[in-house]
């Protein structure tokens, strides 16, 4: 199994290209189930989660081809062609869904297109219980009959889905995707209230509109959808990854460097920019991305709660905590989205951090120095927090179980090395 070796202490200086967003690419790939036409996605990140979803969709009968960068084409990422002319199988089996939660999201499109779906419940997850009750409520509101048998959700809508008024009692990205993808092919009008307004939902909605869907209120928490009878193919480019952006911004903040995050979109960062600035890191919005630097100023402690967009994202909580381990004082970081998302704390302690947990809140007392150690990645975002700490720790940090990192960060070691970090992948 691969490991990542970091020899800390180098400042990051240079330019890092931001890849397409994993959390937009995955639902966009699933959108292809809604049309017999061809969907062409560009700027698709090369990630383990994307490859796994490819296999899951192929299992449903989607024809997928992937091409690399064309001559003269700027930007990174793959061009992916997806064609669901016929849906061969409406079952998403446990062996696949249990490996990636987002694959559960095929439920809505399969129901909308085929009137039936049998999708395995996703099961446990390292960062909390993560139920799917809101997904099922939305499908039932749209007229689906749902039973749960042998670990599978069995959903049918033989007469097709019907528009409905869906009010979520909390904000869920996945349930909003599910409701939106199902409602676009339902008969009549649907209103989704308290919808998640994360940029990835907006990206999916904009792609659906290109395919012929009728959606109002895109980028807000109230989506209004007028169902259509069919959707066509389209071409769409995946938005830049705001979590990758926040992560590299914190790498630069942690090491006191100066980096240009190429193609990053400041409008998608919400509270991250304000938190970085409060922490003493300068964020300059440029035409071609974001310049992040901290030249000489100390890292200042912050009080932050994770929140749905545009609040501070839970997916950047571990990275912020890593950066705050070396702040000039005590930070308070409260996790309000997932109940068990502090697994990085024990590993950060191995590098010499001083963090105390009080329920959903971490008290992070800044230390003057971190020292390298062998550590273990526990989940996607936790693992990259260890990279951030390792970049500033004296000596060598060796991170094992980096398959977690590969789920969501494209060529991380190359991007960091190009800016002067001493980071290498050790194979085997
Ligand atoms: C998505 C993101 C993930 C991010 C999370 C929150 C993808 C592929 N994943 O995950 O990276 O951390 O949003 O921004 O885009 N909940 C319920 N019932 C449900 C569904 C959710 O109670 O039916 C709860 C969850 O347990 C959690 C909260 O709602 O406490 C938010 O979860 P949700 O937004 O659904 O997360 P995901 O869509 O799984």
Image (tube, grey):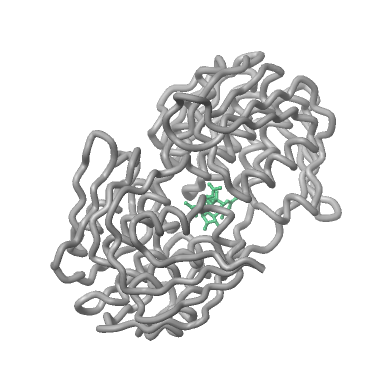
Residue 266 in percent (x, y) is at: 29, 41
263 in relation to 185, above or below: below
Q: Considering the image in quadrants, where does the C terminus appear?
A: bottom right
Q: Nearer the viewer, residue 279 or 191?
A: 279
Residue 204 in percent (x, y) is at: 51, 31
Q: Quadrant of residue 78?
A: top right
Q: Residue at x 66, y 14 (%)?
A: 230
Q: Residue at x 61, y 15 (%)?
A: 228
Q: Residue at x 63, y 56 (%)?
A: 131
376 in relation to 238, above or below: below
Q: Nearer the viewer, residue 7 or 314?
A: 7
200 in relation to 330, above or below: above
Residue 76 as seen in the image, left or right of residue 59: left
- Asked if one can make out residue 262 in the rendered structure from this viewpoint, the answer is yes
Residue 164 in percent (x, y) is at: 58, 28
Q: Residue at x 27, y 56 (%)?
A: 13
Q: Residue furthest left?
A: 297
Q: Considering the image in quadrants, where does the N terminus appear?
A: bottom right
273 in relation to 80, above or below: below
- Asked if one can make out residue 136 in the rendered structure from this viewpoint, the answer is no
Residue 185 in percent (x, y) is at: 64, 21
Count of number-bearing discs = 0
Residue 273 as seen in the image, left or right of residue 126: left
Q: Quadrant of residue 218?
A: top left
């Amino acid at each position: 199994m691969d490991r990542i070796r970091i020899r800390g202490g180098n400042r990051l200086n240079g330019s890092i290209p931001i890849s397409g967003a994993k959390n937009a690419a995955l639902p966009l790939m699933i959108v292809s189930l809604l049309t017999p036409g061809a969907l062409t996605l560009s700027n698709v990140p090369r990630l383990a989660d994307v490859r796994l979803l490819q296999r899951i969709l192929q299992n449903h009968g989607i024809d997928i081809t992937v091409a690399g960068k064309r001559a003269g084409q700027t930007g990174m990422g793959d061009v992916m062609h997806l064609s669901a002319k016929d849906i061969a199988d409406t079952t998403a089996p446990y062996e696949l869904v249990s490996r990636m939660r987002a694959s559960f999201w095929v439920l809505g499109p399969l129901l909308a297109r085929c009137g039936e779906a049998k999708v395995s419940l996703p099961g446990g997850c390292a960062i909390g219980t993560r139920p799917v009750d809101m997904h099922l409520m939305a499908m039932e509101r749209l007229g689906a009959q749902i039973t749960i048998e042998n670990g599978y959700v069995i959903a049918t809508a033989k007469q097709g889905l019907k528009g409905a008024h869906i009010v979520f009692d909390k904000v869920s990205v996945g349930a909003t995707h599910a409701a939106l993808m199902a409602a676009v092919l339902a008969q009549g009008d649907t209103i989704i209230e308290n919808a998640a307004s994360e940029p990835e939902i907006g990206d999916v909605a904009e792609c659906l509109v290109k395919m012929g869907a009728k959606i109002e209120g895109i980028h807000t928490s109230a989506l209004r959808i007028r169902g259509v009878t069919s959707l066509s193919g389209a071409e769409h480019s995946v938005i830049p990854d705001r979590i990758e952006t926040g992560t590299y911004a914190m790498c630069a903040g942690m090491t006191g460097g100066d980096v240009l995050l190429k193609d990053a979109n400041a409008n998608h960062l919400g509270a991250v920019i304000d938190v970085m600035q409060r922490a003493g890191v300068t964020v300059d919005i440029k035409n071609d991305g974001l310049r992040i630097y901290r030249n000489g100023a100390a890292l200042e402690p912050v009080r932050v709660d994770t929140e749905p967009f545009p609040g501070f994202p839970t997916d950047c909580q571990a990275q912020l905590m890593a950066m705050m381990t070396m702040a000039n004082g005590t930070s308070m970081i409260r996790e309000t989205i997932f109940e068990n998302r502090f697994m990085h704390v024990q590993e950060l302690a191995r590098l010499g951090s001083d963090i105390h947990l009080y329920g959903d809140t971490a008290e992070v007392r800044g230390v003057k120095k971190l020292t390298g150690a062998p550590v273990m990645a526990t989940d996607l975002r936790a693992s990259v927090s260890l990279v951030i700490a390792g970049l500033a720790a004296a000596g060598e940090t060796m991170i094992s179980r980096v398959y977690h990192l590969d789920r969501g960060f494209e060529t991380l070691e190359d991007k960091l090395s190009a800016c002067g970090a001493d980071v290498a992948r050790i194979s085997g």
